[in-house]
Image (tube, grey):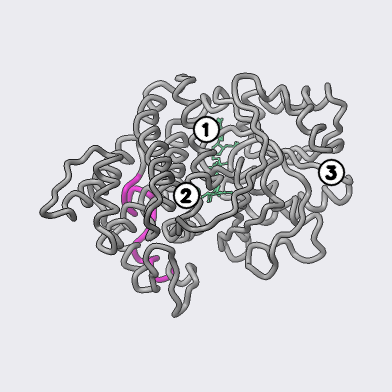
Amino acid sequence: MLDFTFYSPTKFAFGRDTEKQAGTLVREFGGSNVLIHYGGGSVVRSGLLDRVKSSLDEAGVRYTELGGVHPNPLSDLVYEGIDICRKENIDFILAVGGGSAIDSAKAIALGTLYDGDFWDFYSGAAAPQKALPVGTVLTIAAAGSEGSGDSVITNKTTMEKRGAGGECIRPKFSILNPALTQTLPAYQTACGVTDIMAHVFERYITNTTDVEITDRLCEAVLITMKNEAPKVIADPNDYEARANIMWAGMVAHNNIVGVGRAQDWNSHGIEHELSGLYDCAHGAGLAVIMPAWMTFVMNHNVMRFAQAAVRIWGCDMDFTYPERTALAGIKAFRTFLHNIGMPINFAELGAKEEDIPALVEKFGIGDGKTGGFVQLDKNDIAEIYRIAAHAEL
Ligand code: NZQ
Ligand code: ZN
Protein backbone atom coordinates (compact mmCIF):
# COMPACT_ATOMS: atom_id res chain seq x y z
CA MET A 1 0.00 0.00 0.00
CA LEU A 2 1.22 3.51 -0.81
CA ASP A 3 1.46 6.27 1.81
CA PHE A 4 -1.44 8.70 1.80
CA THR A 5 -3.23 11.57 3.52
CA PHE A 6 -6.99 11.31 3.64
CA TYR A 7 -9.09 14.28 4.73
CA SER A 8 -12.71 14.35 3.68
CA PRO A 9 -14.56 16.79 5.91
CA THR A 10 -17.97 17.02 4.17
CA LYS A 11 -20.92 16.72 6.58
CA PHE A 12 -23.67 14.45 5.22
CA ALA A 13 -27.35 14.59 6.14
CA PHE A 14 -28.80 11.35 4.73
CA GLY A 15 -32.42 10.21 4.58
CA ARG A 16 -36.01 11.23 4.01
CA ASP A 17 -36.91 14.93 4.24
CA THR A 18 -33.30 15.94 4.95
CA GLU A 19 -33.68 18.89 2.54
CA LYS A 20 -35.51 20.58 5.42
CA GLN A 21 -32.11 20.96 7.08
CA ALA A 22 -30.73 23.15 4.27
CA GLY A 23 -31.20 26.43 6.17
CA THR A 24 -29.63 25.29 9.43
CA LEU A 25 -26.72 23.66 7.61
CA VAL A 26 -26.00 26.82 5.60
CA ARG A 27 -26.02 28.75 8.89
CA GLU A 28 -23.74 26.17 10.53
CA PHE A 29 -21.14 26.78 7.85
CA GLY A 30 -21.33 30.55 8.05
CA GLY A 31 -23.68 31.36 5.17
CA SER A 32 -26.20 34.19 5.38
CA ASN A 33 -26.52 35.29 1.75
CA VAL A 34 -26.80 32.33 -0.61
CA LEU A 35 -26.71 31.72 -4.36
CA ILE A 36 -29.04 28.79 -5.07
CA HIS A 37 -27.74 27.12 -8.23
CA TYR A 38 -29.72 24.50 -10.13
CA GLY A 39 -30.25 22.85 -13.50
CA GLY A 40 -32.84 22.77 -16.22
CA GLY A 41 -35.92 22.62 -14.03
CA SER A 42 -36.32 19.15 -12.51
CA VAL A 43 -35.99 20.66 -9.02
CA VAL A 44 -38.69 23.23 -9.85
CA ARG A 45 -41.09 20.58 -11.17
CA SER A 46 -40.55 18.26 -8.19
CA GLY A 47 -41.19 21.04 -5.66
CA LEU A 48 -37.73 20.54 -4.15
CA LEU A 49 -36.61 24.09 -4.86
CA ASP A 50 -39.59 25.49 -2.96
CA ARG A 51 -38.87 23.23 0.01
CA VAL A 52 -35.22 24.33 0.05
CA LYS A 53 -36.24 28.00 -0.12
CA SER A 54 -38.69 27.49 2.78
CA SER A 55 -35.89 25.99 4.82
CA LEU A 56 -33.63 28.98 4.05
CA ASP A 57 -36.49 31.37 4.92
CA GLU A 58 -37.02 29.66 8.26
CA ALA A 59 -33.31 29.99 9.06
CA GLY A 60 -33.35 33.69 8.08
CA VAL A 61 -30.96 33.13 5.17
CA ARG A 62 -31.24 35.48 2.15
CA TYR A 63 -30.88 34.00 -1.32
CA THR A 64 -30.56 34.74 -5.02
CA GLU A 65 -31.38 32.09 -7.64
CA LEU A 66 -29.49 31.04 -10.74
CA GLY A 67 -30.98 28.11 -12.64
CA GLY A 68 -30.27 26.75 -16.12
CA VAL A 69 -27.17 24.62 -15.57
CA HIS A 70 -26.80 22.41 -18.64
CA PRO A 71 -25.91 18.72 -18.13
CA ASN A 72 -22.16 18.81 -18.91
CA PRO A 73 -22.09 22.33 -17.43
CA LEU A 74 -20.90 25.19 -19.61
CA SER A 75 -18.53 28.05 -18.86
CA ASP A 76 -20.95 30.84 -19.85
CA LEU A 77 -23.26 30.27 -16.88
CA VAL A 78 -20.23 30.13 -14.60
CA TYR A 79 -19.28 33.68 -15.67
CA GLU A 80 -22.85 34.79 -15.02
CA GLY A 81 -22.77 33.21 -11.57
CA ILE A 82 -19.47 34.89 -10.71
CA ASP A 83 -20.95 38.30 -11.64
CA ILE A 84 -23.99 37.67 -9.46
CA CYS A 85 -21.91 36.55 -6.49
CA ARG A 86 -19.78 39.69 -6.68
CA LYS A 87 -22.70 42.09 -7.15
CA GLU A 88 -24.83 40.51 -4.42
CA ASN A 89 -22.02 39.83 -1.94
CA ILE A 90 -22.91 36.16 -1.87
CA ASP A 91 -21.14 34.25 0.93
CA PHE A 92 -22.33 30.67 0.26
CA ILE A 93 -23.34 28.67 -2.83
CA LEU A 94 -26.01 25.99 -2.53
CA ALA A 95 -26.21 23.61 -5.47
CA VAL A 96 -29.57 21.84 -5.80
CA GLY A 97 -29.35 19.08 -8.38
CA GLY A 98 -26.82 16.66 -9.83
CA GLY A 99 -23.14 16.70 -10.61
CA SER A 100 -23.62 19.39 -13.23
CA ALA A 101 -25.23 21.91 -10.86
CA ILE A 102 -22.68 21.05 -8.18
CA ASP A 103 -19.67 21.36 -10.52
CA SER A 104 -20.95 24.66 -11.88
CA ALA A 105 -21.42 25.89 -8.28
CA LYS A 106 -17.84 24.89 -7.47
CA ALA A 107 -16.55 26.77 -10.52
CA ILE A 108 -18.49 29.89 -9.50
CA ALA A 109 -17.16 29.51 -5.96
CA LEU A 110 -13.60 29.44 -7.31
CA GLY A 111 -14.04 32.22 -9.83
CA THR A 112 -15.69 34.67 -7.45
CA LEU A 113 -12.57 34.89 -5.29
CA TYR A 114 -10.11 34.90 -8.21
CA ASP A 115 -8.87 37.97 -10.07
CA GLY A 116 -8.20 36.16 -13.36
CA ASP A 117 -10.35 33.97 -15.61
CA PHE A 118 -11.85 31.01 -13.70
CA TRP A 119 -10.93 28.79 -16.68
CA ASP A 120 -7.30 29.03 -15.52
CA PHE A 121 -8.17 26.38 -12.91
CA TYR A 122 -9.50 24.05 -15.62
CA SER A 123 -6.75 24.63 -18.18
CA GLY A 124 -4.14 23.95 -15.51
CA ALA A 125 -2.80 27.52 -15.55
CA ALA A 126 -3.68 28.00 -11.84
CA ALA A 127 -4.26 25.73 -8.85
CA PRO A 128 -7.40 26.19 -6.72
CA GLN A 129 -6.48 27.77 -3.39
CA LYS A 130 -9.62 29.46 -2.12
CA ALA A 131 -13.31 29.45 -2.92
CA LEU A 132 -16.65 30.44 -1.48
CA PRO A 133 -18.09 27.60 0.62
CA VAL A 134 -20.37 25.22 -1.29
CA GLY A 135 -23.18 22.99 -0.01
CA THR A 136 -25.32 20.56 -2.01
CA VAL A 137 -28.79 19.03 -2.11
CA LEU A 138 -28.22 16.02 -4.36
CA THR A 139 -30.89 14.74 -6.75
CA ILE A 140 -29.00 12.04 -8.70
CA ALA A 141 -26.52 9.41 -7.57
CA ALA A 142 -23.75 9.55 -10.14
CA ALA A 143 -20.82 11.95 -10.27
CA GLY A 144 -19.90 11.83 -6.58
CA SER A 145 -19.32 15.58 -6.67
CA GLU A 146 -21.26 15.84 -3.39
CA GLY A 147 -18.23 14.45 -1.59
CA SER A 148 -15.36 15.23 -3.95
CA GLY A 149 -12.98 18.13 -4.39
CA ASP A 150 -13.43 17.97 -8.16
CA SER A 151 -15.38 19.95 -10.72
CA VAL A 152 -15.73 19.34 -14.47
CA ILE A 153 -16.74 22.16 -16.85
CA THR A 154 -17.03 22.43 -20.63
CA ASN A 155 -15.57 25.56 -22.24
CA LYS A 156 -18.39 27.01 -24.37
CA THR A 157 -15.93 28.43 -26.90
CA THR A 158 -13.66 25.43 -27.49
CA MET A 159 -16.01 22.65 -26.23
CA GLU A 160 -13.07 21.27 -24.25
CA LYS A 161 -14.27 19.47 -21.13
CA ARG A 162 -11.77 19.81 -18.32
CA GLY A 163 -11.54 19.19 -14.58
CA ALA A 164 -10.20 21.18 -11.64
CA GLY A 165 -9.50 19.78 -8.21
CA GLY A 166 -8.75 21.20 -4.78
CA GLU A 167 -9.76 20.83 -1.14
CA CYS A 168 -11.31 24.31 -1.13
CA ILE A 169 -14.18 23.16 -3.38
CA ARG A 170 -15.07 20.03 -1.45
CA PRO A 171 -18.65 20.65 -0.25
CA LYS A 172 -19.04 21.74 3.38
CA PHE A 173 -22.21 19.71 3.59
CA SER A 174 -24.30 17.53 1.32
CA ILE A 175 -27.93 16.61 1.78
CA LEU A 176 -28.68 13.13 0.44
CA ASN A 177 -32.35 12.18 0.38
CA PRO A 178 -32.71 8.99 -1.72
CA ALA A 179 -36.41 9.73 -2.29
CA LEU A 180 -35.38 12.74 -4.40
CA THR A 181 -33.88 10.35 -6.95
CA GLN A 182 -37.18 8.52 -7.50
CA THR A 183 -38.22 11.02 -10.19
CA LEU A 184 -35.18 10.19 -12.35
CA PRO A 185 -35.85 8.68 -15.76
CA ALA A 186 -34.51 5.10 -15.97
CA TYR A 187 -31.87 6.21 -18.47
CA GLN A 188 -30.44 8.84 -16.12
CA THR A 189 -30.51 6.37 -13.24
CA ALA A 190 -28.52 3.91 -15.34
CA CYS A 191 -26.05 6.62 -16.40
CA GLY A 192 -25.48 7.35 -12.73
CA VAL A 193 -24.94 3.69 -11.90
CA THR A 194 -22.39 3.42 -14.71
CA ASP A 195 -20.49 6.49 -13.52
CA ILE A 196 -20.37 5.16 -9.96
CA MET A 197 -19.00 1.82 -11.15
CA ALA A 198 -16.47 3.58 -13.37
CA HIS A 199 -15.22 5.65 -10.43
CA VAL A 200 -14.51 2.42 -8.59
CA PHE A 201 -12.92 0.63 -11.55
CA GLU A 202 -10.60 3.62 -12.17
CA ARG A 203 -9.22 2.86 -8.71
CA TYR A 204 -9.59 -0.93 -8.65
CA ILE A 205 -7.53 -1.60 -11.77
CA THR A 206 -4.15 -0.76 -10.30
CA ASN A 207 -0.49 -1.75 -10.32
CA THR A 208 -0.25 -1.32 -6.55
CA THR A 209 0.02 -4.63 -4.71
CA ASP A 210 -1.10 -5.59 -1.18
CA VAL A 211 -4.19 -3.38 -1.13
CA GLU A 212 -6.61 -5.99 0.19
CA ILE A 213 -8.69 -3.51 2.21
CA THR A 214 -9.38 -1.13 -0.68
CA ASP A 215 -9.76 -4.05 -3.13
CA ARG A 216 -12.51 -5.44 -0.91
CA LEU A 217 -14.15 -2.02 -0.42
CA CYS A 218 -14.17 -1.53 -4.20
CA GLU A 219 -15.69 -4.96 -4.71
CA ALA A 220 -18.38 -4.21 -2.13
CA VAL A 221 -19.45 -1.08 -4.00
CA LEU A 222 -19.39 -2.83 -7.38
CA ILE A 223 -21.38 -5.85 -6.15
CA THR A 224 -23.88 -3.49 -4.51
CA MET A 225 -24.37 -1.71 -7.83
CA LYS A 226 -24.72 -5.02 -9.66
CA ASN A 227 -27.46 -6.09 -7.24
CA GLU A 228 -29.30 -2.81 -6.59
CA ALA A 229 -29.34 -1.21 -10.05
CA PRO A 230 -31.76 -3.73 -11.63
CA LYS A 231 -34.12 -3.16 -8.70
CA VAL A 232 -34.46 0.59 -9.32
CA ILE A 233 -34.72 0.13 -13.07
CA ALA A 234 -37.63 -2.26 -12.42
CA ASP A 235 -39.16 -0.14 -9.65
CA PRO A 236 -38.07 3.54 -9.56
CA ASN A 237 -39.73 3.95 -6.15
CA ASP A 238 -37.64 1.28 -4.40
CA TYR A 239 -36.40 3.58 -1.64
CA GLU A 240 -34.01 1.09 -0.05
CA ALA A 241 -32.26 0.30 -3.33
CA ARG A 242 -32.11 4.05 -4.09
CA ALA A 243 -30.56 4.61 -0.67
CA ASN A 244 -27.85 2.01 -1.25
CA ILE A 245 -27.04 3.46 -4.66
CA MET A 246 -26.96 7.02 -3.34
CA TRP A 247 -24.45 6.26 -0.62
CA ALA A 248 -22.44 4.11 -3.03
CA GLY A 249 -22.16 7.14 -5.31
CA MET A 250 -20.54 9.13 -2.53
CA VAL A 251 -18.29 6.31 -1.35
CA ALA A 252 -17.15 5.62 -4.92
CA HIS A 253 -15.64 9.05 -5.40
CA ASN A 254 -14.59 10.71 -2.13
CA ASN A 255 -11.54 8.44 -2.44
CA ILE A 256 -12.12 6.22 0.59
CA VAL A 257 -11.88 3.23 -1.79
CA GLY A 258 -8.90 4.66 -3.65
CA VAL A 259 -6.38 5.68 -1.02
CA GLY A 260 -3.00 3.99 -0.96
CA ARG A 261 -3.19 2.78 -4.55
CA ALA A 262 -2.20 4.11 -7.97
CA GLN A 263 -5.30 5.00 -10.02
CA ASP A 264 -5.76 5.10 -13.77
CA TRP A 265 -8.39 7.63 -14.99
CA ASN A 266 -7.80 7.22 -18.72
CA SER A 267 -11.37 5.99 -19.28
CA HIS A 268 -12.66 9.24 -17.82
CA GLY A 269 -10.35 11.36 -19.94
CA ILE A 270 -11.25 9.43 -23.09
CA GLU A 271 -14.97 9.68 -22.25
CA HIS A 272 -14.88 13.42 -21.50
CA GLU A 273 -14.04 14.05 -25.14
CA LEU A 274 -17.22 12.19 -26.14
CA SER A 275 -19.55 14.08 -23.77
CA GLY A 276 -17.72 17.30 -24.67
CA LEU A 277 -18.22 16.76 -28.43
CA TYR A 278 -21.62 15.05 -28.57
CA ASP A 279 -23.14 16.39 -25.32
CA CYS A 280 -24.12 12.84 -24.35
CA ALA A 281 -24.46 11.84 -20.70
CA HIS A 282 -21.09 11.15 -19.05
CA GLY A 283 -22.30 7.77 -17.74
CA ALA A 284 -23.48 6.70 -21.20
CA GLY A 285 -20.09 7.61 -22.66
CA LEU A 286 -18.37 5.59 -19.95
CA ALA A 287 -20.55 2.55 -20.74
CA VAL A 288 -19.08 2.62 -24.25
CA ILE A 289 -15.49 3.48 -23.29
CA MET A 290 -14.68 1.64 -20.08
CA PRO A 291 -15.13 -1.97 -21.31
CA ALA A 292 -13.16 -1.00 -24.45
CA TRP A 293 -10.33 0.37 -22.32
CA MET A 294 -10.40 -2.81 -20.22
CA THR A 295 -10.13 -4.97 -23.33
CA PHE A 296 -7.15 -2.93 -24.55
CA VAL A 297 -5.13 -2.94 -21.31
CA MET A 298 -6.16 -6.35 -19.92
CA ASN A 299 -2.95 -8.17 -20.82
CA HIS A 300 -0.90 -5.78 -18.69
CA ASN A 301 -2.20 -7.70 -15.63
CA VAL A 302 -4.56 -10.49 -16.58
CA MET A 303 -4.84 -11.73 -13.01
CA ARG A 304 -6.26 -8.43 -11.79
CA PHE A 305 -9.02 -8.62 -14.40
CA ALA A 306 -9.56 -12.30 -13.62
CA GLN A 307 -9.92 -11.38 -9.93
CA ALA A 308 -12.58 -8.83 -10.85
CA ALA A 309 -14.35 -11.39 -13.02
CA VAL A 310 -14.49 -13.98 -10.26
CA ARG A 311 -15.20 -11.75 -7.26
CA ILE A 312 -17.56 -9.21 -8.83
CA TRP A 313 -19.25 -11.01 -11.69
CA GLY A 314 -19.12 -14.57 -10.33
CA CYS A 315 -17.19 -16.01 -13.29
CA ASP A 316 -15.41 -19.37 -12.97
CA MET A 317 -11.62 -19.12 -12.75
CA ASP A 318 -9.82 -20.74 -15.66
CA PHE A 319 -6.39 -21.46 -14.19
CA THR A 320 -5.00 -22.68 -17.50
CA TYR A 321 -6.18 -19.68 -19.52
CA PRO A 322 -6.79 -16.83 -17.04
CA GLU A 323 -7.26 -14.40 -19.93
CA ARG A 324 -10.51 -16.24 -20.72
CA THR A 325 -11.72 -15.45 -17.21
CA ALA A 326 -10.64 -11.82 -17.59
CA LEU A 327 -12.50 -11.54 -20.89
CA ALA A 328 -15.59 -13.17 -19.38
CA GLY A 329 -15.56 -10.49 -16.65
CA ILE A 330 -15.37 -7.65 -19.19
CA LYS A 331 -18.18 -9.27 -21.16
CA ALA A 332 -20.28 -9.58 -17.99
CA PHE A 333 -19.73 -5.87 -17.29
CA ARG A 334 -20.79 -4.88 -20.81
CA THR A 335 -23.83 -7.16 -20.68
CA PHE A 336 -24.83 -5.67 -17.32
CA LEU A 337 -24.59 -2.17 -18.78
CA HIS A 338 -26.67 -3.19 -21.79
CA ASN A 339 -29.29 -4.77 -19.52
CA ILE A 340 -29.76 -1.56 -17.52
CA GLY A 341 -30.29 0.34 -20.77
CA MET A 342 -26.86 1.76 -21.52
CA PRO A 343 -25.34 2.10 -25.01
CA ILE A 344 -22.39 -0.21 -25.65
CA ASN A 345 -20.94 1.13 -28.93
CA PHE A 346 -20.64 4.35 -30.95
CA ALA A 347 -23.83 3.80 -32.94
CA GLU A 348 -25.92 3.34 -29.80
CA LEU A 349 -24.32 6.41 -28.22
CA GLY A 350 -24.72 8.60 -31.30
CA ALA A 351 -20.96 8.94 -31.85
CA LYS A 352 -19.21 8.65 -35.24
CA GLU A 353 -16.14 6.62 -36.07
CA GLU A 354 -14.92 9.29 -38.51
CA ASP A 355 -14.61 11.68 -35.55
CA ILE A 356 -11.94 9.52 -33.88
CA PRO A 357 -8.98 11.61 -35.14
CA ALA A 358 -10.68 14.77 -33.83
CA LEU A 359 -11.42 13.09 -30.49
CA VAL A 360 -7.79 12.02 -30.15
CA GLU A 361 -6.63 15.52 -31.05
CA LYS A 362 -8.93 17.04 -28.42
CA PHE A 363 -7.67 14.51 -25.86
CA GLY A 364 -4.57 16.59 -26.20
CA ILE A 365 -1.56 14.52 -25.15
CA GLY A 366 0.39 15.23 -28.32
CA ASP A 367 3.35 12.86 -28.42
CA GLY A 368 3.17 12.20 -24.67
CA LYS A 369 1.66 9.36 -22.65
CA THR A 370 -0.87 9.23 -19.87
CA GLY A 371 -2.48 6.80 -17.42
CA GLY A 372 -1.87 5.25 -14.01
CA PHE A 373 -2.31 1.56 -14.94
CA VAL A 374 -0.98 1.50 -18.49
CA GLN A 375 0.64 4.55 -20.06
CA LEU A 376 -1.17 5.18 -23.34
CA ASP A 377 -0.10 7.25 -26.33
CA LYS A 378 -2.36 8.83 -28.96
CA ASN A 379 -2.35 5.68 -31.12
CA ASP A 380 -3.52 3.62 -28.14
CA ILE A 381 -6.29 6.14 -27.43
CA ALA A 382 -7.41 5.93 -31.06
CA GLU A 383 -7.48 2.13 -30.84
CA ILE A 384 -9.65 2.27 -27.70
CA TYR A 385 -12.10 4.55 -29.52
CA ARG A 386 -12.12 2.03 -32.39
CA ILE A 387 -12.81 -0.91 -30.05
CA ALA A 388 -15.60 1.15 -28.48
CA ALA A 389 -17.03 2.03 -31.88
CA HIS A 390 -17.50 -1.62 -32.84
CA ALA A 391 -18.27 -3.23 -29.46
CA GLU A 392 -20.88 -5.97 -29.36
CA LEU A 393 -22.31 -8.21 -26.66
O1 NZQ B 1 -31.05 19.82 -15.21
P1 NZQ B 1 -32.19 19.15 -14.55
O2 NZQ B 1 -33.52 19.65 -15.01
O3 NZQ B 1 -32.07 19.15 -13.04
O4 NZQ B 1 -32.19 17.61 -15.05
C1 NZQ B 1 -31.13 16.73 -14.79
C2 NZQ B 1 -30.27 16.47 -16.02
O5 NZQ B 1 -31.04 16.57 -17.20
C3 NZQ B 1 -31.68 15.36 -14.51
N1 NZQ B 1 -32.00 15.14 -13.11
C4 NZQ B 1 -31.15 15.23 -12.06
N2 NZQ B 1 -31.80 14.86 -10.95
C5 NZQ B 1 -33.08 14.55 -11.30
C6 NZQ B 1 -33.21 14.74 -12.68
N3 NZQ B 1 -34.36 14.50 -13.35
C7 NZQ B 1 -35.42 14.07 -12.62
N4 NZQ B 1 -35.36 13.84 -11.30
C8 NZQ B 1 -34.21 14.06 -10.60
N5 NZQ B 1 -34.16 13.78 -9.30
O6 NZQ B 1 -30.65 14.45 -14.86
C9 NZQ B 1 -29.86 15.02 -15.89
C10 NZQ B 1 -28.39 14.83 -15.55
O7 NZQ B 1 -28.02 15.64 -14.45
P2 NZQ B 1 -26.47 15.91 -14.20
O8 NZQ B 1 -26.35 16.80 -13.02
O9 NZQ B 1 -25.83 16.33 -15.46
O10 NZQ B 1 -25.95 14.42 -13.86
P3 NZQ B 1 -24.66 13.89 -13.15
O11 NZQ B 1 -24.81 13.95 -11.67
O12 NZQ B 1 -24.39 12.59 -13.77
O13 NZQ B 1 -23.49 14.92 -13.50
C11 NZQ B 1 -22.79 14.81 -14.71
C12 NZQ B 1 -21.63 15.77 -14.74
O14 NZQ B 1 -20.71 15.49 -13.68
C13 NZQ B 1 -19.39 15.36 -14.25
C14 NZQ B 1 -19.66 14.77 -15.59
O15 NZQ B 1 -18.58 14.87 -16.47
C15 NZQ B 1 -20.86 15.61 -16.05
O16 NZQ B 1 -20.45 16.85 -16.54
N6 NZQ B 1 -18.52 14.63 -13.33
C16 NZQ B 1 -18.15 15.25 -12.20
C17 NZQ B 1 -17.30 14.65 -11.29
C18 NZQ B 1 -16.89 15.35 -10.04
N7 NZQ B 1 -17.21 16.63 -9.89
O17 NZQ B 1 -16.24 14.78 -9.16
C19 NZQ B 1 -16.73 13.33 -11.53
C20 NZQ B 1 -17.41 12.57 -12.59
O18 NZQ B 1 -16.52 11.60 -13.10
C21 NZQ B 1 -17.94 13.38 -13.74
O19 NZQ B 1 -16.94 13.66 -14.69
ZN1 ZN C 1 -17.32 9.94 -13.71
The picture quadrant where one finds residue 254 is top right
Answer whether residue 77 is visible to the viewer in this image.
no
Mark 2 sits near ligand 1, with its Cβ under 8 Å away: no
Upstream in sequence: badge 3 or badge 2: 3
For ligand 1, which image quadrant applies? top right
Residue 247 is labelled as 1
Q: Residue 356 in magenta? A: yes
Residue 268, position in %: x, y?
A: 46, 56
How dense is the environment of label 2, judged by Cα within 10 Å: few (below 14), some, or many (20 and up)? Answer: some
Q: Amino acid at mark 1?
A: Trp
> In 3D space, how far apart are the residues under numbered discs 1 and 3 (Cα atoms)?
28 Å
Question: Where are the magenta residues, as a range?
Answer: 343-358
Q: Amino acid at mark 2?
A: Cys
The picture quadrant where one finds residue 126 is bottom right
Front tag of 1 and 2: 1
Q: Which residue is mark 3?
A: 91
How dense is the environment of label 3, judged by Cα within 10 Å: few (below 14), some, or many (20 and up)? Answer: some
Answer whether residue 158 is visible to the viewer in this image.
yes
> In 3D space, how far apart are the residues under numbered discs 1 and 2 (Cα atoms)?
25 Å
Q: Which residue is mark 2?
A: 280
